Structures are given as C-alpha cells and as structure tokens.
Image (spheres, grey):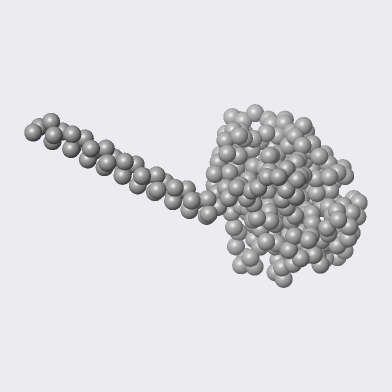
Amino acid sequence: MGDAMVTTEQVRLTPDMQSRQGAVWSRMPCQLKDWEMQVHFKIHGQGKKNLNGDGLAIWYTKERMQKGPVFGNMDNFTGLGVFVDTYPNEEKYLEAQKKRYTPRTERIFPLVLAMVGNGTISYDHERDGRPTELGSCNAMVRNLKHDTFVFIRYVSRRLTVMIDIDGQHEWRDCLDIPGVRLPKGYYFGASALTGDLTDNHDIISMKLYQITVLNQKNQDDNEEDVTIPSVDNIELIRWKGNEEGMSSIAIFFTVLFSMVGSIFLIVIGLVVYSHWNETRRKRFY
C-alpha cells in the first residue's frame, strides 16, 4: 500500500525521501490464540543523530490497509501497535510548552514502545505516544551493519516484546505486560512514515509462529472470548513503568537526599536529647 516497494530482498515501506508512507498487510486474519511474531527489519538513511524519521510500526489490528498519521497507519486503531520510533517529537513539544524533562521521565531515542487501542484511543504524536504507552525501551537501530530484529509474543494474555539489535544473536528484554486481551481474527501488518525528516524503512521478513500452551483446553474452558482489546490495571502498569524508568541521575539524587535527610534527623535528635539530658541533670541537683 502507498509508497511501499517489493523487491526480492525486502519490502521497502518508505524510501529515504520526504512525505512518504507505505504499508504491507496480511490478507487473512489470524485465528491463533497464542502466537509470536519475529520481525527482521532495517532502518537506514543519510540523516545523522536526530535528523531522521519517523519510524515504523508492527500491527495486529482489526483494521487493515488504512492510511493515517500513526507511522503510516490510521489513528484510533483497534488492537496492538509496536512502534520503532526514531525521532523525539516530544522535545519540540516541551520547548513550545516551556517545559523541561525531569530525569525520571526522559526517554532516549530511537525507542521501541507498545500501545493497545480499542478504537477510541488516539496516539499522541506530539508526545511520542507517552500517554498511552504500556512500556518502552531504548533501541539504537539506525544505520547498523548487522541484522536487527523485534520479537512480539502474546501467550496466555501476556504481551512480551524483546529486541535483538546488538549483533550478538541474543534477545534483550524490552517490555513484559500481563493482562493484555487481544481478540482473534485480527490482521498483521507493518507500516512506516516520513515527513520533513526521512529514512529507508525496510521489512526483510515477518515470521508468525503458533504457541502451544500446556493445559490449553482447561484454560480455554475457563476464559471468555475477548471482543474488545484491553489491558488489565493499565494505570498501575503505566505508573510502574515510569518508576522503573528512573534514570541513574534520579536514583543518585534520591539516595543522596535520603541520606542527607537521615543525617539531619539524627543531628536534630542528638541536639534534643542533649538538651533534655542537661535539663534533667539540673533538676536532679
């Protein structure tokens, strides 16, 4: 769809040119209850540092073949989106709002993040999806000479995303979210988008595997069919993710202020005790 080009080696979702968007979608819906998807991709171009964009997305959604602003796909989608975001739009947003990052909430780009939509939730492009993200991890994926992969697993209503981007053929944890509910019968796809900043966004392969879970029959009997995508305790998950995302600087200052506060309380305690002891001695004599 769109500007996507198919070759013998890859599907190039967008070329390294401005204002392009492209996608590739499965024709048949997925009827698997538990599955995993391994995506071999490559992002490369002439831009340096932050002068590149915007990224690509892997989809498992009810809708297919719909152009839009979310990495080349429609907004208010129904299902799962896993985004490889290469440009930090939020920096400009915060500058316009005259706000600054705090060490606890700063994110390093490129970034891999996940979002579950129910058809009414909009992706906040200006803030790089921060209000709706389930979790994220840093992933330096641009202009690498070795292969890069993202791994998405959905088993027993648990969403796991891992990456292999260091050329070591080892999966690294990115996010692990329990209580994710995704219906069967959705479509897999991949899309990408460029604006003023550009990159080549290539999909080399997308491999889908069925996962067999022990005692699957008993589990299926106890579970009701999912009709609308959702995430259990989503606010708690986002709060936990922010806490786990504290930078080393934030941790350092937290420990430092805690130590200073403890010392201050000890000193105050000693002064009060000394004063009380002195008063007690005077009364005794």
Q: Residue furthest bottom?
A: 145
Q: Residue at x 55, y 41 (%)?
A: 240
Q: Residue at x 84, y 48 (%)?
A: 72
Q: Nearer the viewer, residue 199 or 80?
A: 199
Q: Residue 137: horizontal and vertical position, in percent?
A: 63, 52
Q: Residue 65: horizontal and vertical position, in percent?
A: 87, 44
Tell me if residue 53 comes above or below residue 144 in the rendering.
Answer: above
Q: Residue at x 63, y 65 (%)?
A: 166
| 160 relative to 123 in the view: left or right | left
Q: Nearer the viewer, residue 6 or 102?
A: 102
Q: Nearer the viewer, residue 127 or 137?
A: 127
Q: Nearer the viewer, residue 215 or 59?
A: 59
How many discs mark residues in the rendered view?
A: 0
Report which quarter residue 273 is drawn in.
top left
Q: Residue 138: horizontal and vertical position, in percent?
A: 64, 56
Q: Residue at x 26, y 37 (%)?
A: 272
Report which quarter residue 281 is drawn in.
top left
The answer, for residue 267, to whether it is visible in the render is yes
| 12 relative to 106 in the view: left or right | right
The answer, for residue 81, to whether it is visible in the render is no
Report which quarter residue 149 is drawn in.
bottom right
Q: Residue 236: horizontal and vertical position, in percent?
A: 57, 35
Q: Which quadrant of the rendered structure holds the C terminus? A: top left
